[in-house]
Image: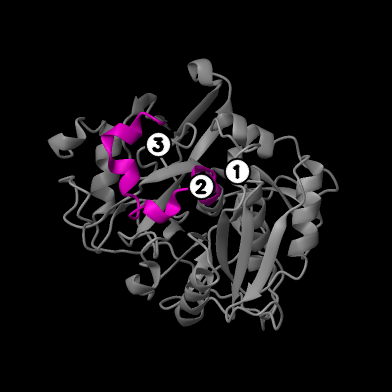
Amino acid sequence: MRIASELGYRLSAVTAVAVLAGCNGSGASTSMPSIAQTGAEMQAPVRAKAGDTAVPACVGRGFGTATCDALIRTDVVPGLRPDVSGYGPADLQAAYNLPSSTDGAGQIVAIVDAYDNPNVASDVAAYRAEFGLPPANLVKYNQNGQTGNYPAPNTGWGVEIDLDSEMVSASCPLCTIYLVEADSSGASDLQTAEAEAVTLGAHVVSNGFTGTGLKRSSFDTSGVTYLGSAGDGGQGVGEPAAFGTVVAVGGTSLSRGGGGKRGWTESVWKASGGGCTTEPKPRWQHDTACAFRLANDVSAVGDPNTGVAEYDTYGYGGWFVVGGTGVATPFLAGVFGLAGNAGMQDGGRTFWQKEHQQYLYRLKSGGKYVRYSTTGGWGSPNGVRAF
């Protein structure tokens, strides 16, 4: 199987299978959970099944709703200090060669989530203090732009809210963070929050969730870069990542050592979403593997076995380790903040331009480095010049 000659490479066997497996005519992950955790129900955090090493922080109800893409490691007991197996900001900045200590001031990165985490400000402050980051410029809004009258709290989505805030902090500690909380995980509320993020002045909007029933028009404002996580259920792409107006973000496995001068080894994460969608193909995408939009565009750490440290005191006991494409999405939103030109982007087009691909780390798949894979996209950031 071959992507169009303009891309200039032959797919590896693993990648070819991944592309074909994704072309199932479905724009959403086939493994979307069906049990809801709503603010009103206030269920306890999801617990592990026998043998599980990671479980979803929150789950969705089906069509017209979304679920956050955070996976909690169950073999790491939450504690008062960050677990050494969870990467902190310095690790991630080094792994991706980021100018985090100097760039990003004045850039607004919005994160959209459902429900409320009442402890987010203190949790983010603790995270940043632990890792020596400057105090956060974090403002929390409801979906109507008020700094009050927040939605019902929810422990599952609370994990994603803390995670989003902390991952933007990790990549772009000088960025301003706007957290916009939707009243629910329903498509209508999330889209209201999406529009409000733009109204508030954000040029980067991170969506660490996947769902169905969302409208492309809600993620298509000129001068705004939207990012969407591809999901954690393997082949298949949820919304809004499926839209050609959105940067589709996949997850990787990131390990210290190897990788030549980089000093890190990074591979395609098999559980990351990715593949063909049923959305129109963007004009800048010229592959022949899919008649419709092909995802992903770019990726970063997402495998919970090589996950990141998170601090959460709303329903959890402090520090634990988290993975999922809900990690990579806000982290890369912060990288767009570092680059400072989000208003000039067109969905994920920048990563499909050959002159920018030299500034992305290629990923390993099947033991070999590949130029493109559906789950990992064109690779992960080597600095900000691809952004």
Q: Secondary structure at mark 3?
A: loop
Report which residue position mark 2 lands on. 332
Depth check: 28 or 174 in front? 174
Q: Secondary structure at mark 2?
A: helix
Nearer-N-terminus badge (3/1): 1
Position in image of residue 75 (x %, y %)? 70, 45
Residue type at numbered disc 2: Leu
Residue type at numbered disc 3: Gly
Q: Which residues are magenta?
A: 332-359
Question: Taking the image as drawn, is residue 313 in sight?
Answer: no
Position in image of residue 93 (x %, y %)? 61, 34
Residue sitting farthest toward the right: 80
Q: Does residue 254 belong to the magenta stretch?
A: no
Q: Are marks 1 and 2 in contact (CB under 8 Å)?
A: yes
Question: Taking the image as drawn, is residue 147 in sight?
Answer: yes
Q: Residues within 10 Å of mark 3 (few under 14, many from 20)?
A: many
Residue 115: mark: none
Q: Secondary structure at mark 1?
A: helix
Q: CA distance from mark 1 to mark 2?
A: 7 Å
Report which residue position mark 1 lands on. 171
Q: CA distance from mark 3 to mark 1?
A: 17 Å
Report which residue position mark 3 lands on. 379
Residue type at numbered disc 1: Ser
Q: Residues within 10 Å of mark 1 (few under 14, many from 20)?
A: many
